[in-house]
Image (spheres, rainbow, N blue to C red):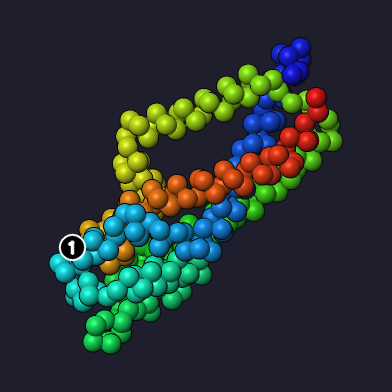
């Protein structure tokens, strides 16, 4: 397929194809985020798979912030608390400090500490920034798809496409393999969040951390996001991307 293209044309075709794929991947991840958000990021599933209830029963009785009674709450309260956090971080974090849980004595107790609220507000700021990035990415995707279709850009050879995809993918796996998901996850936190804001919480001091079995839950959510994004990407690619490049 297009194996006789001149070297310059092949390079241009591969570059434009890779740009289309990159913008489409980011767009698919954005849609995947919305899909996963609508089902509470499959928290109920990961709650069971990661045995989060065991973490809560084990560490919350040692809570240093006066919230030991959360250990006696049921699974529905845990699901509800996580869902409330998800809703608030997508709403500029306005109601985080007011989130509460009902203990065994039917008393409403504040769920989050001040440090947890500040951290989750930082997460909310990050989400708002990612929304802007997503909007820009969508405009770039439309522009480059329209441009490729208009100039009748040929599709790059299969071999070049494989090389263009395998090289960055291999780099990502090498980094994760060398340092591990947890270390990479923590390092990214140091880049994203303000230096004077706490972002690491021990289970014994944080209901938020216990509820999320941090960072294990985030690995699970990353899997959910990736699988959903891959399905969305494949559908859009078959319906659109495979048709804009000319043979």
In the rendered image of this protein, does residue 239 appear above or below residue 212?
above
Residue at figure coordinates x 77%, y 31% from the top left? 245
- Element assignment for label 1: helix
Q: Residue at x 36, y 73 (%)?
A: 76
Identity of the residue furthest to the left in this view: 62
Give the number of marks. Answer: 1
Q: Nearer the viewer, residue 247 or 134?
A: 247
Hey, which quadrant is residue 9 in on the image?
top right
Q: Position of residue 62 (x, y in %)?
A: 15, 67
Residue on which the image places disc 1: 58
Which residue appears at 35% of the width and 41% of the height?
A: 181
Where residue 203 appears, as percent x and y from the top left, is 23, 60
- Name the side, left or right, on which 233 lies relative to 169: right
Residue 126 sits above or below residue 69 on the image: above
**Other-residue count near label 1 (Cα within 10 Å), few / some / many at <14 / 14–19 / ≥20:** some
Query: Image quadrant for the C terminus?
Result: top right
Q: Residue at x 76, y 15 (%)?
A: 5
- Is residue 68 found left or right of 47 in the rendered image? left
Determine the residue located farthest toward the bottom in the rendered image: 106
In this orientation, does residue 65 appear? no
Front one among 181 and 243: 243
Q: In this rendering, would 78 be left or right of 38?
A: left
Say above or below: 110 vs 192: below
Residue 177 rendering spot, x and y as whole percentages: 35, 32
Q: Quadrant of residue 210?
A: bottom left
Residue 55 visible: yes
Quarter of the figure that contains the N terminus: top right
Residue 178, image quadrant: top left
Q: Is residue 110 above or below residue 179?
A: below
């Amino acid at each position: 397929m297009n194996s006789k293209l001149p070297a310059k044309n092949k390079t241009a075709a591969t570059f434009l194809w890779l740009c289309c794929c990159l913008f489409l991947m980011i767009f698919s991840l954005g849609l995947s985020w919305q899909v996963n958000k609508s089902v509470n990021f499959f928290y109920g599933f990961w709650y069971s798979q990661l045995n989060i209830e065991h973490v809560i029963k084990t560490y919350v009785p040692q809570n240093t912030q006066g919230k030991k009674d959360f250990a006696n709450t049921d699974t529905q309260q845990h699901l509800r608390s996580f869902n409330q956090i998800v809703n608030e971080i997508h709403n500029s974090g306005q109601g985080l400090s007011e989130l509460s849980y009902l203990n065994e004595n039917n008393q409403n107790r504040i769920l989050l500490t001040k440090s947890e609220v500040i951290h989750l507000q930082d997460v909310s700021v990050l989400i708002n920034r990612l929304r802007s990035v997503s909007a820009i990415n969508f405009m770039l995707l439309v522009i480059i798809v329209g441009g490729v279709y208009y100039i009748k850009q040929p599709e790059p050879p299969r071999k070049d496409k494989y090389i263009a995809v395998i090289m960055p993918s291999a780099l990502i796996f090498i980094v994760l393999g060398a340092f591990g998901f947890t270390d990479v996850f923590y390092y990214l936190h140091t880049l994203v969040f303000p230096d004077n804001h706490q972002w690491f919480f021990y289970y014994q001091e944080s209901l938020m951390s216990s509820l999320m079995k941090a960072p294990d839950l985030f690995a699970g959510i990353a899997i959910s996001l990736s699988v959903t994004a891959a399905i969305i990407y494949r559908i859009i690619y078959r319906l659109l991307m495979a048709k804009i490049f000319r043979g």
